[in-house]
Image: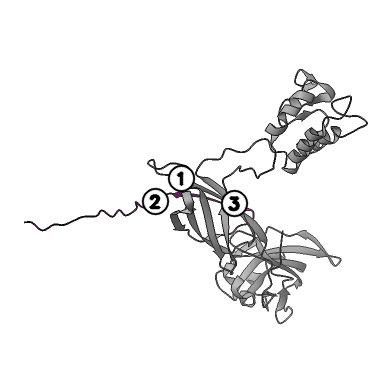
Amino acid sequence: MKSVFAIAATAAMVALSSCNPLSPRDLDRQGTSRVAVAFDPSALGPLAAQMKTLKVRVYKVENETRGTQEGADKDFAIVQQQAEYSLTGVKLGPKEFEVSILNADNLALGTGTIRHLVKPGVNVTGALIIKLNAVQQPITNLGIELALATPPDLDPGIAKRVIMKWKTQTGAEGELELKKPGAIPAGVLTLADVQPILEESCISCHKATNAKKKLQLDVFPFKSGFIADQSELLKEVLARIQDEDAPMPPGELMEASNIEKFKAWETGGFLAAAATGAADAFAGKLEGLKVADKLSCTIIVFGEGDSELFRKDLEPYTIIENGQLKLTLPLEIAAPSVSIPITVQPAG
């Protein structure tokens, strides 16, 4: 999902001008010119620090309509505010310039276009201003995967709970509990719960050696000669066991309690089985983060009785679109201090 990032000034200024007048070296025999692009990102406030690249595309204009692109994209590293960048070899005639401002991950913070007549001699005086329609900072989700490297002298399952306290450079913050992968919520059924029903009522007619209607239910994912998409096939199986006119298995509908189990299996997402994640593996997801923002976090590991075992501050992480933050932390648990009572008696 994309979201417009509102800032005080919503326009970046890009001035396009041909040299005025052109010197001989600016105009060659092929009828091309040099076009200067002056870029002032100061109107964008704090986002200026995230700008890394100025991308310019040049298009022909034919009968007032933008035509094909002329040449390759021109990328300029933004090295200072109000710097001038030069496009050489721009053909004379009406052109449309498309200017994009990219961050370090090559995501466009904003794009604007302007038309300009490139010609020899005296050109239009004054700067032509491109106002970006909007400065966008995409919104993304960030998957978190954490593995704890447990020392050999400790039980790998000593970590019972992991909390991630996080905040971003732009002021968002929160607390996320990382879960062990594959944990099945209460009430959610898996294939193991419906397997006895399949074996009793379905598999005799729908197995590798006797796949009626080209439907095979003795393997998972199920196989069908007619429905390739597994999700659609599962829904079709669920519909057939509730079809009073053409029930499956043939004859009459299966028991209502068995149908309800299939429905519960669908509600849970047709899970095959609970994943058996490692004892020291945890995962979670942060939602609604701004791309190119900086994420800082503290990992806190708890053991039995919610006793704190370990705490570590992580280096700031630059959020990328559809990112996956994978971490491996050594579980360094300090030895507890031990008090040994000592009685000192005078000699006598």
The image shows residue 280, relative to residue 170, as above or below, that is above
Secondary structure mostly taken by the magenta-highlighted segment of the chain: loop
The secondary structure type at the circle numbered 2 is loop
Instruction: Find out whether residue 16 is within the magenta segment.
Output: no
Does residue 261 appear left or right of residue 182 in this picture? right
Q: Amino acid at mark 3?
A: Gly
**Residue in the image at 57% along x and 37% along y:** 276
User: Disc 1 to disc 2, how far (Cα)?
Assistant: 11 Å
**CB-based contact (under 8 Å), mark 1 and mark 2:** yes
Crowding at mark 3 (Cα within 10 Å: few <14, some 14-19, many 20+): some
Q: Where does the magenta region start and end?
A: 320-348
Query: Which circle's residue, 3 or 1, is located before the other in the chain?
Result: 1
Residue 86: horizontal and vertical position, in percent?
Answer: 62, 69
Quickly name the residue at label 1.
Answer: 158
The secondary structure type at the circle numbered 3 is strand
Farthest residue toward the top? 209
Residue 333's disc is 2
Q: Amino acid at mark 2?
A: Ile
Quickly name the residue at label 3.
Answer: 284
Query: Which circle's residue, 3 or 2, is located before the other in the chain?
Result: 3
Q: Is residue 303 visible?
A: no
